[in-house]
Amino acid sequence: MNTREDRVKWFMQDRFGLFIHWGLYSIPARGEWLRANEKISIEEYQPFFEEFNPVHYNPREWAKAAKAAGQQYAVLTAKHHDGFCLFDSQLTDYKATNTPAGRDLIKEYIEAFRAEGLKVGLYYSIIDWHHPDFPKYGDRYHPMRDNEEFQGEDTHFSNYVAYMHGQVKELLTNYGKIDILWFDFSYDDMTGEKWEAAKLVNMIRSMQPDVLIDNRLGGNIRLAEPEVYAGDFYSPEQIIPPGGIVNRANQPIPWEACITLNDHWGYHAKDLNYKSPKQVIRTLVECVSKGGNLLLNVGPNAKGEIPEQSLAILQVVGKWMRQNGDSIYGCTSSDLPKPEWGRYTQIGNYLYAHVYDRGIGPIYFQGLKGRIKKARLLADGSELHVETPWMAEQYSDIENGAFIDLSGAVLPDEMDTVIELELLE
Ligand code: FHN
């Protein structure tokens, strides 16, 4: 019986993944919540099913872009809240193989990303606004939540639960080894055993014991003895937990922050509010400096193309990762206090100083006097010298501090200049 600690080893090493939100909602191009936000009925949404034909869908290109960005795994929406299945499920007709696309988009994604050496995850919405037995009127989010036509409707939620479990079984049966099952999301009383989550997870573990599961089936992953369905990692969204995530015994637990590149998960044609490559790099560093992962999202359009703006950001991030990936992969938090000029990540006796603020004079390393065996600029491997310059003699912490004088008034990389410090054992 493998443990969570066994299962998450690769996850804690890989640190950086690609989230992909894609489906029928890419056609109206107003984000994946448009049915709920605009109270769109199944009938009003049906034209997008009739039309869906991503003629430029080439997941190998997606995989190459992710790999070049330094991402080590990916998570693609197999089914989002609208209930549309990108995979060839035998339990519904509401699937990509029945649209003009006529293909199993998940099969192609998994084959392509595996071929590029990336691990493959599947996002699966436990919410389903298409299934007839999912609660509608009075539900907190359902597109028909206020439509009195559905008041008193006779639904059989157990039918939906059986359908949901059956689809998860399909995903774990028909596509080989799946590395992550990313369930989304529980709310109000729609949580835990409402989904028959223990039975679901026991089935998952019997089929693919190594698959990672997020914490959105319900339960409390921070308990000393979490429920079987509480998951393998915590999944903060659009936020980085200030001090990382610990359980009730104050022990760090695996976590992954999922963050959009603009302000929407699914494709939104008018949302051009993209983060800069610098923001993405510093977000990734912050996650790792707090013991977590970053799952960075793209929302491909109706043609199956990742937006150019997203690709451009990923390319810049990838260049930085090629030079500085050692300060991310397998790294975690340091016990040292956060320095004024940036952040630390660490793996064993290698401490990585992520310098954001050049400041004036030498870079000051509190508490590291006599502890640094070697210092290198990570990007090019050039030697840096640890020495106490004259001006520090009178005005700085020469008792406990170490100093590195980066020549010049500007940093070699204003996004994040990384100094590799090999510490004495
Ligand atoms: O409702 C979803 C949303 O569409 C998106 O999939 C995010 C990604 O984590 N999860 C839910 C919102 O918390």
Image (spheres, rainbow, N blue to C red):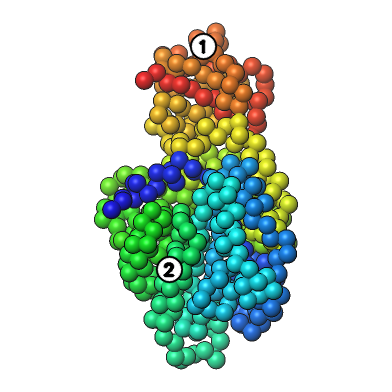
Q: Residues within 10 Å of mark 1 (few under 14, many from 20)?
A: few
Dividing the picture into quadrants, the one containing residue 42 is bottom right
Callout 2 amino acid: Lys
Q: Judge by depth and name the residue closer to the eye, 358 or 346.
A: 346
Q: Position of residue 220 (x, y in %)?
A: 34, 59
Tag on residue 324? none
Q: Is residue 375 left or right of residue 99?
A: left
Q: Position of residue 275 (x, y in %)?
A: 65, 48
**Residue drawn 41% across the image and 25% down it:** 349
Disc 2 to disc 1, C-alpha distance: 60 Å
Q: Position of residue 365 (x, y in %)?
A: 48, 22
Q: What secondary structure is found at the residue carrying circle 1?
A: loop
Give the residue pinned by disc 1. 387
The answer to whether residue 130 is above or below residue 252 is below
**Residue drawn 41% across the image and 14% down it:** 370
Q: Position of residue 224 (x, y in %)?
A: 26, 53
**Residue drawn 63% across the image and 39% down it:** 318
How many badges with numbers are in the image? 2
Give the residue pinned by disc 2. 169
